[in-house]
Structure formats: structure tokens, C-alpha cells
Amino acid sequence: MEFIQIANVTMPIQQLAAIIALFGAWLYVRIQYGKSFADRFGNTAFLFVIVWKFSIILFQFPLVLQAPISILYFNGGTYGFWLGLAVALLYAYIKKMPSFKMAGAWASIIVLYPLASSALLGAWTVWTFIQAAGSILFFFVAKEGLERALTLLLFWQLLFLSAEGRLIGMESLVYIIVTAYFIIWRKKT
């Protein structure tokens, strides 16, 4: 795992890439869908980050008791990430956020996360741009059918993850689960 240091804080690059992707998605929905939906999406993203960050209290309580400052430096790890994701998706569902708009926000996260990750790692390649260009096509195909477009975007991302030898991992699992969630949610609404 690669780390980046900002002032006195050291954080994994994946976390910073996720935050950049969430912010980029917020900008996209702000421009595309307006202030009202952007505020609700921002609340969802903030809820995800807060639950992920502070779930260390739930999953590493003895550590937090022994060193309370660990709350600032650590997060809830993999379990906290999944808990944050579940809470954020549940919040979006309870608030009856439009599935088409949420799927657009999710697609922008999928486009921006690999770009942010590559930029922070300094690992720009031609494949990074091909991946981004192919991912951006989602926004044109989505008008034809959201389920088809999300499925194509998922397989496009999985193709690049498999080329990098990272097909079996947390990133691909997140892509699969959240995409399936949006497709099922869309069919129910």
C-alpha cells in the first residue's frame, strides 16, 4: 500500500483517491443535476467518510481506549469501509434519492477514482487514458438504458483491473456490489 504525506498526516493513497473521486462526483452532480441533489449526494458521501473514519471505535475499541488519538490517524479498515458503504447506500435509499442520478454519481466515481489513484501514484500510462475515455462513454450510453450502461461500465473497469492483476480484490468487489445494488434499486423504483 502506497502512502502520501500531507503536512504531519500520512494517509494511504487509496483513501485520498476515494476522497478526490467523491469530491469530483459531487461537482458532477452539482453541475448536472443542481444544488438540491448535490447537497443530498454530499450528505451521502460525507456520511460514508464519517462512518468509515470513526468505525475504528467499533472495530478497534481496545486500541481507541489505549490511545484515543488513534481516532485521528486510523480508520475502520476494510470492515469500516463496508459499513460506511452500507450506511451510505441505505441513507440514499431511505431518502428516496433518484436512482438514475445516483447511478450517474456512481459512474463519475468509477471514472475519477482510477484517474486520481494514477495521478497520486505518478503512474500515468496510455491505458489510464484509454480506461478513462471508455468510462466516459457511460454518460452517452446511459441515455439508452441505465442497466446496460452500468453493466458495460462495470465490465470495462473489471477488464482493466484484470489486466493489472487486480481482478480479485476489494476494488472490483465494490464495483460489482454497488453496480448490482443500483441495477436492483432501479428495477424496484
Image (tube, helix red, strand yellow):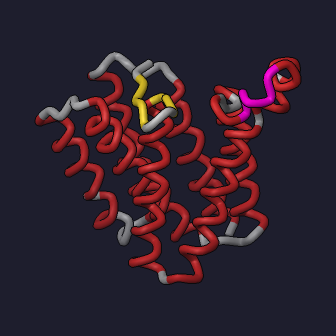
Instruction: From the viewer's perspective, tell me whether residue 115 is left or right of residue 89.
Output: left
- Seen from the viewer's position, the closer of residues 135 and 73 is 73
Residue at 61% x, 63% y is 186
Res. 90 image quadrant:
bottom right
- Seen from the viewer's position, the closer of residues 184 and 109 is 109
- The single residue placed furthest to the front in the displayed view is 8
Residue 109 at what x, y percent from top left? 44, 52
- Seen from the viewer's position, the closer of residues 3 and 181 is 3
| 105 is higher (above) or lower (below) than 143 | above
In the picture, which quadrant includes the N terminus?
top left
Taking the magenta stretch, the answer to whether it contains residue 70 is: yes
| 48 is higher (above) or lower (below) than 71 | below
* Residue span colored magenta: 67-71
Residue 27 at what x, y percent from top left? 42, 68
Residue 9 at what x, y percent from top left? 51, 33
In the picture, which quadrant includes the C terminus?
bottom right
